[in-house]
Image (tube, coloured by chain):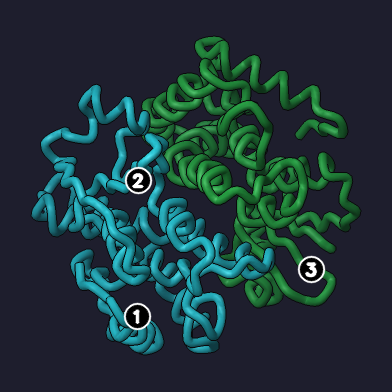
Chain colours: A cyan, B green
C-alpha cells in the first residue's frame, strides 16, 4: 500500500507511527501541501477534499482522514478491540481530537512553526490557547485515572492524540502543567517500533 | 438507556434519528446548553467536555460524541458493515463531518438561528460560507455517483451528514445548488421510522 503524506504534519505522522508499530510494509509518497501538491487535479481525483494523509490500497481503493486510516490499519491488532463499547470509546476520543483538540493545538502550532507567527495571525494564535488548554485538561483528567485514554490498554485513540499532543509546545502549550500527559507520552515513546516525528 | 441532549442541535438529532430508525427504547433527557446545563458539576462528572449528546448505558457507563454514539447504537444492524474497508469509509465521512462540515454549516446556523445574527458575529458568519459550500460540493460530487455517501447502501455516515445538511439553509446555504444532495435528503426522509428534527 501507499501513503500520501507529509510526516511533519501530526495527522500524517499518526499514520506513519501506526504503520511502524504494526510493522506494516508501505511506500510513503511525500506531498507538499504548502506548494499546493494536494490540490492538483491528479490528487483531487484520489481525495476530493484535497487533504493528506491518504491511504491507497493495492486494489486501487482509497481511505482518507487520519483516524479512519489508523483504525483500518489496526483492525485485528492489539490496538483495536472489537468490543462495541470499547470501540465506541476509541472513536469518542478520536472525534474529540478532531473537533476539540486539533483545531486549537495543531492550528496554533501551524501558525507558529510553519508561518513564523506573523503579526496578522497573532490574535488567532492567542485565541487558540484557551481551547487547547481545555483539551489538554480533559486528557489530563483521564490520564490521572488510567494509563491510556480508554483504560489500561493502548489503543488507536492514544496514537491519535499523541500526534499533536507531543508537539503541543510548538504551539505555545507548556506540557509541564500536565504531569499525567507527560508520563503517557513516555509510555508511548517506549513502545517497540516507536518512531519519532 | 438514557440520552442527554437537545433535539434542536444537529449533533443530538443524529442520535434521536438513529434511535428511531433502529426502534430502540430510551429516555431522552433535555439539556439546555444556552443556560449552562451541560456545564454543571453533575454533568461534567458524566462528560468532562461538557458537551451533548451523551449516551448513558444502563450499567452506568457513558459514551460521548454523536458519531461514536450512533456507530455504537448501529453495531450489528444494516446501518453498519463489519467489513473493515466499509467501516473505514463510514468513519472517513464522519471525521470529514466533524472537521470540514460541522464547524462551518452548524456554526453558521447557530449564529443565525440561535443568536439572531448579531452584528459582532456577522464577519464570522460570512467567513463560514466558503468552507460550508466546499463541504457541500464534496458531498454533491459523491452523491452524483452513488445514492448514499459510502455506496449503494445507507450507513451511519448518511445519518451523520444528514444532521446538519438538511438544515443548512438556516445557516445561509442554498441547497438548490446541490440537486444530488436534495435527492439524498429525500431518500433518508422516506426511511421507515424516520423522524423530523
Q: Crowdedness of circle 3 by 10 Å Cα count: few (<14), some, many (20+)? A: some
Q: Quick check: B173 above or below A29? A: above
Chain identifier of the residue bearing label 1 in the image: A
Marker disc for residue A55: 2
Q: Which residue is mark 1?
A: A188
Image vertical order of residue B120 relative to residue A87, above or below: above
Q: Secondary structure under badge 1?
A: helix
Q: Give the label on residue B164, or none.
A: none
Q: Secondary structure at mark 3?
A: loop
Front residue of this view, candidates A128 and B92: B92
Which mark, residue B57? 3
Horizontal and vertical percent for residue B108?
50, 34
Along the line of sight, the residue nearer the viewer: B50 or B32: B50
Query: Residue at horizontal 76%, vertical 67%?
Result: B56
Task: Report the side of B26 relative to A52 (left or right).
Answer: right
Q: To which quarter of the image does residue A132 belong?
A: bottom left
Amino acid at each position: 500500500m501507499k501513503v500520501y503524506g507529509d510526516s511533519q504534519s501530526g495527522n500524517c505522522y499518526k499514520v506513519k507511527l501506526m504503520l511502524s508499530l504494526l510493522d506494516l510494509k508501505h511506500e510513503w509518497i511525500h506531498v507538499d501541501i504548502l506548494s499546493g501538491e494536494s490540490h492538483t487535479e491528479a490528487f483531487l481525483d484520489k481525495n476530493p477534499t484535497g487533504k493528506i494523509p491518504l491511504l491507497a490500497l493495492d486494489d486501487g481503493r482509497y481511505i482518507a482522514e487520519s483516524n479512519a486510516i489508523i483504525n483500518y490499519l489496526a483492525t485485528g491488532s492489539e490496538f483495536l478491540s472489537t468490543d462495541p463499547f470499547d470501540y465506541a470509546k476509541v472513536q469518542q476520543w478520536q472525534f474529540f481530537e478532531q473537533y476539540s483538540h486539533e483545531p486549537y493545538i495543531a492550528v496554533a502550532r501551524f501558525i507558529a512553526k510553519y508561518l513564523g507567527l506573523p503579526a496578522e495571525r497573532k490574535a488567532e494564535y492567542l485565541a487558540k490557547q484557551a481551547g487547547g488548554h481545555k483539551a489538554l485538561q480533559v486528557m489530563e483528567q483521564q490520564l490521572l485515572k488510567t494509563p491510556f485514554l480508554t483504560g489500561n490498554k493502548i489503543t488507536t485513540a492514544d496514537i491519535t492524540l499523541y500526534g499533536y499532543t507531543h508537539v503541543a509546545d510548538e504551539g505555545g502549550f507548556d506540557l509541564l502543567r500536565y504531569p499525567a500527559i507527560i508520563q503517557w507520552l513516555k509510555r508511548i515513546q517506549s513502545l517497540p517500533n516507536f518512531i519519532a516525528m
